[in-house]
Amino acid sequence: MMTATALVLLMTPGLALFYGGMVRSKSVLNMMMMSFASVGLVGVLWVLYGYSMTFGTSVGDAGIVGDPAQFAGLQGLTAGTYLADAETGAEVAVPLVGTIPTLVFVGFQATFAIITVALISGAVADRMKFGSWLVFAGIWVSVIYFPVAHWVFAFDDVTAGAGGWIANDLAAIDFAGGTAVHINAGIAALVLAIVIGKRRGWPREPMRPHNLTLVMLGAGILWFGWFGFNAGSAVGSGAISAFAFLNTIVATAAAMIAWLLVERFRDGHPTSLGAASGVVAGLVAITPACSSVSPLGAIAVGAIASVLCALAVGLKFRFGFDDSLDVVGVHLVGGLAGTLLIGFFATADSAAGVDGLLYGGGVDQLWRQAVGALAVLAYSGIGTAIIAFALKFTIGLRISDEDEATGIDETEHAESGYDFSTLRGGGNLRPAAGASTQSARDHEPATAGQEV
């Protein structure tokens, strides 16, 4: 479980690379900083009160939120005998969740909270004040993520008391976070992108990814880390984690191929960005379903969700919302698809032990999945709108047009992702070895007498 925790934590730097490569070169550091800052901010808040709000005993009978004071500062979770007495053979006694030390479980779940916040940042690339992002992230994780994670992840036997209503009363299946992570972050990204407004020049000006190599590297790291995300959600090594592990492989493989096929028939050529996006779409979709569908079902879930995501990324142009890095098209749509497809492809032969519609189970599980998804959509969407508008009319959300034109890396962080100063000389601007000409153009447009 500590290995799984480290894998999930690695996903956030992987996301930083994935997102960083997709923006223009003048925004790469800010984009990566939004992910890295989530690690620091959410990591601290998780210890102070986040774990308690998520896995503490529910306040009241509705299963809405855990008691924030119960484990504040992780009080009561560190007591115990840590070393057995070699002479007497006394057993080690520490607080446990299942069969693992509670502190390992605390660390594992912290990484989920961290990456959920980081996912949202891709929708507001190039234009959100870094300070406003930190304030938004701190408020959002406290009033949106912690309660929603309590709904979904706080089973009664984990909280040692009354847990969340989706996990225990509704009995919707979300093994590793389709609702709490991806639908939650996806709808928040949509709302925040609408409230903050479009990037300067979008969609008239081309805003191509500046480094597709980083994008593919980030996607590979995400796939690697996602084994901790999904298999680790079994909270132990055994048959259930093996089930989730294999499904994470095959669903993602099918999703990548499906996205490339969509591109081939729609655009005439498969792309590296499409391959990376298909990988992430498959990972998102199988996250809630990895314990409830067969390997063949996992292939179907990955392929169907990927096709839907590949088509959905174009909706921003039709409806006019600037979701910069397709968080809505991949995470919201992929999370919804994976959550709802459980109602069709779940099989009692799986670890979850539930039959879906296609296996003779009727619509019983499908309606439970739909209610859970819609509840998270409504709560996160409305809550995010309130937070975003409050910040917009107080401290402000976005940088000025002038700063956006200059580049958010320089104006917000006084840094540049790539140093081109050594390339100037003799009236020429030539890329260094290994640098793309597109990166050079993005960093500083050529003027008369210069060649790129």
Image: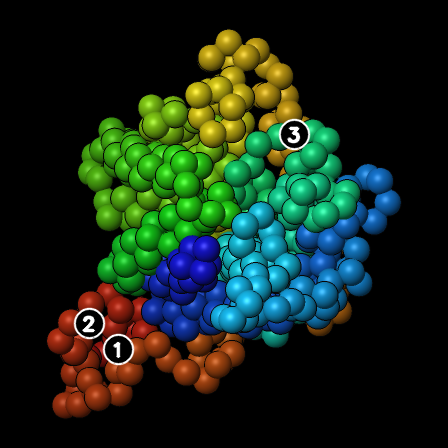
Report the residue that reaches farthest toward the right.
60
Whether residue 273 can be seen here: yes
- Tell me the quadrant of the picture where the C terminus can be found: bottom left
Answer with left or right where residue 382 lies relative to residue 235: right
Residue 201 in percent (x, y) is at 46, 59
Residue 151 in percent (x, y) is at 69, 42
Tag 2 secondary structure:
loop
Task: State the CA–CA distance, disc 3 to disc 1.
Answer: 62 Å
Foreground: disc 2 or disc 1: 2
Foreground: disc 3 or disc 2: 3
| Location of residue 102 (image quadrant) | bottom right
- The first of marks 3 and 2 along the sequence is 3
Inspect the image, locate mark 3, and give the three-letter code of the amino acid beneath it. Ala
Residue 228 in percent (x, y) is at 41, 51
Asked if the residues shown at circle 3 and circle 2 are in contact, with their CB atoms under 8 angstroms apart, the answer is: no
Q: Is residue 73 above or below residue 419?
A: above
The residue positioned 38% from the left and 54% from the top of the image is 225
Foreground: disc 3 or disc 1: 3
Task: State the CA–CA distance, disc 3 to disc 2.
Answer: 52 Å
Q: Is residue 290 above or below residue 189?
A: above
Tag 3 secondary structure:
loop
Q: Nearer the viewer, residue 99 or 29?
A: 99
Report the residue that reaches farthest toward the front.
87
Q: Which residue is mark 2?
A: 435
- The first of marks 3 and 1 along the sequence is 3
Q: Which residue is mark 3?
A: 171
Q: Which residue is mark 1?
A: 447
Q: Residues within 10 Å of mark 2 (few under 14, many from 20)?
A: few
Whether residue 15 can be seen here: no
